[in-house]
Image (tube, rainbow, N blue to C red):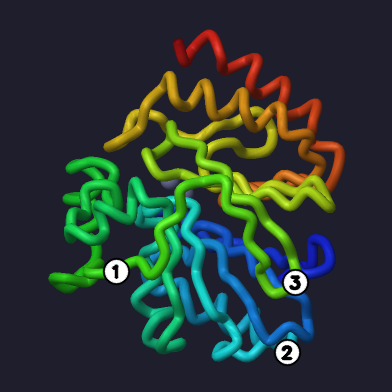
Amino acid sequence: MIEKIVEGVYWIAGKDKFLPDSHVYLIGLPDSGDFTMVDCGLMEMGSYKLSEIESIGVKPKDIKRVILTHTHLDHIGCLPEIIEAIPGIEIWVHEDEGRYMERGDDRVIWGNKMFESMIRAQMTIPKNYFDLKPHRKLKGGEVLDLGGVTFKVIHIPGHSIGSIGLLNEEHRLFISGDTIYADGAIGRYDLFTADASQMKSSLELIANLGIDYLLPCHNRVVKGAAGPMIRKTVTNWAPLLS
Ligand SMILES: [Zn+2]
Ligand SMILES: [Zn+2]
């Protein structure tokens, strides 16, 4: 199912398997011919998402870039499939994780050794599968025109070092990656490059953005009036993140 959240922002829900599969957000006004995917999802979970996107009349060749909220496996696992389906598509990622990608260092992707061996035991992942190079490294603070919809990049480290959120001020809409979810949950802060005190600062920053629409990359999306829920989540977690 692909669902329109506001004009130019669509949600394609992830389909969790033995691991979670991230949601994908598609950004771009219908006639722009310039679309952006935010995150991709787990291995083998790319083609249904592209079919959903095509079902609203968007041609894959008009998807110009993937912006990664961060580079965990459940968000970039199917990126090689997406690149195969859409040659020339660009990868945009925060510089702090882009550097790991450029070095071919996949420790952020796996999160920890235990996950890596568990997943490798269940599926064959070719060598160099994640040999991906970013086309643009983001710093945070950039204001992007994505097919006629404006988003500001917000660096929110804590879940991972290069986690970003995307803020659309017109609709008070925030794509939060795995940093904060609906219903009181936040992302893990025990994986490689995660940091509890950075998580605390990033959550506080998010609570002060004045968000109405909260679009996380897992579980439920909140379509309006998300502010009080976010504030409560941040207040509840703060003592545990010191
Ligand atoms: Zn994650
Ligand atoms: Zn995730």
Instruction: Return the x and y of residue 132 as percentages of the image width and height.
Output: 28, 69
Instruction: Return the x and y of residue 196 as percentages of the image width and height.
Output: 41, 22
Instruction: Return the x and y of residue 53 as percentages of the image width and height.
Output: 65, 80
Looking at the rendered structure, the kind of residue marked 3 is Gly
Residue furthest toward the left? Answer: 127
| Residue denoted by label 3 | 148
Sequence-wise, which precedes: disc 2 or disc 1? 2
- Residue 1 seen in render: no
Q: Height in image: 173 above or below 13?
A: above
**Residue at 17% across, 58% down:** 103
Sequence-wise, which precedes: disc 1 or disc 3? 1
Sequence-wise, which precedes: disc 2 or disc 3? 2
Looking at the rendered structure, the kind of residue marked 1 is Lys
**Residue at 43% across, 19% down:** 197
Q: Is residue 10 left or right of residue 37?
A: right
Q: Is residue 56 left or right of residue 53?
A: right
Looking at the rendered structure, the kind of residue marked 2 is Gly
| Residue denoted by label 1 | 133
| Helix, strand or loop under label 2 | loop
Closer to us: mark 2 or mark 1? Answer: 1
- Residue 213 seen in render: yes
**Residue at 46% across, 87% down:** 86
Count residues near mark 2 (Cα–Cα under 10 Å), then give few for <14, some for 14-19, many for 20+. Answer: few
Marks 1 and 3, how far apart at CA? 26 Å
Q: Are marks 2 and 1 in contact (CB under 8 Å)?
A: no
Mark drawn on residue 57: 2
Count residues near mark 1 (Cα–Cα under 10 Å), then give few for <14, some for 14-19, many for 20+. Answer: some
In the rendered picture of this protein, how many numbered marks are placed on residues?
A: 3
Q: Height in image: 12 above or below 74?
A: below
